């Protein structure tokens, strides 16, 4: 994945998490990952696998495409 795409995904995870009024702790518990790992994803220190992205999207109650579709950013 290109760095700009990874950054876009990371920003989307954080933005949608905040829109859902979820803390990192709450989302990490829902996804069965550590809060530290989720924080690293949101800060760009770690890149989640596709499997992990699917789990995050499911727990944010959004389609995976909402996290990864760079075209949505270009439409904004």
Image (tube, rainbow, N blue to C red):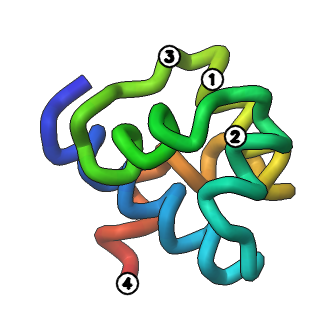
Q: Secondary structure at mark 4?
A: loop
Q: Position of residue 49 (x, y in %)?
A: 50, 16
Which picture quadrant has residue 25?
bottom right
Mark positioned earlier in the residue sequence (2 or 4): 2
Q: Which label sits in the foreground, 1 or 4?
A: 1
Label 3: few (<14), some (14–19) or many (≥20) C-alpha neighbours in 10 Å: few
Is residue 10 shown above or below 1? below
Give the side of residue 5 with respect to residue 26, left or right: left
Tell me, for residue 49, which label it has, or none: 3
Contact? badges 3 and 1 (CB < 8 Å): yes
Q: Which residue is mark 4?
A: 76
Label 2: few (<14), some (14–19) or many (≥20) C-alpha neighbours in 10 Å: many
Mark 2–mark 1 Cα distance, whole angstroms, equals 6 Å
Mark positioned earlier in the residue sequence (2 or 3): 3
Mark 2–mark 3 Cα distance, whole angstroms, equals 11 Å
Q: Please name the residue shown 56% across and 18% down the image.
A: 50
Is residue 2 shown above or below 17? above
Contact? badges 2 and 1 (CB < 8 Å): yes
Mark 3–mark 1 Cα distance, whole angstroms, equals 5 Å
Mark positioned earlier in the residue sequence (1 or 4): 1
Q: Please name the residue shown 37% across and 84% down the image.
A: 76
Q: Secondary structure at mark 3?
A: loop
Label 4: few (<14), some (14–19) or many (≥20) C-alpha neighbours in 10 Å: few
Q: Which residue is mark 2?
A: 56
């Amino acid at each position: 994945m290109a760095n700009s795409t990874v950054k876009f995904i990371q920003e989307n995870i954080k933005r949608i998490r905040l829109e859902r009024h979820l803390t990192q702790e709450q989302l990490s518990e829902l996804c069965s990952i550590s809060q530290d790992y989720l924080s690293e994803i949101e800060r760009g220190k770690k890149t989640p696998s596709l499997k992990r992205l699917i789990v995050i999207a499911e727990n944010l109650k959004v389609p995976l495409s909402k996290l990864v579709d760079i075209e949505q950013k270009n439409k904004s």
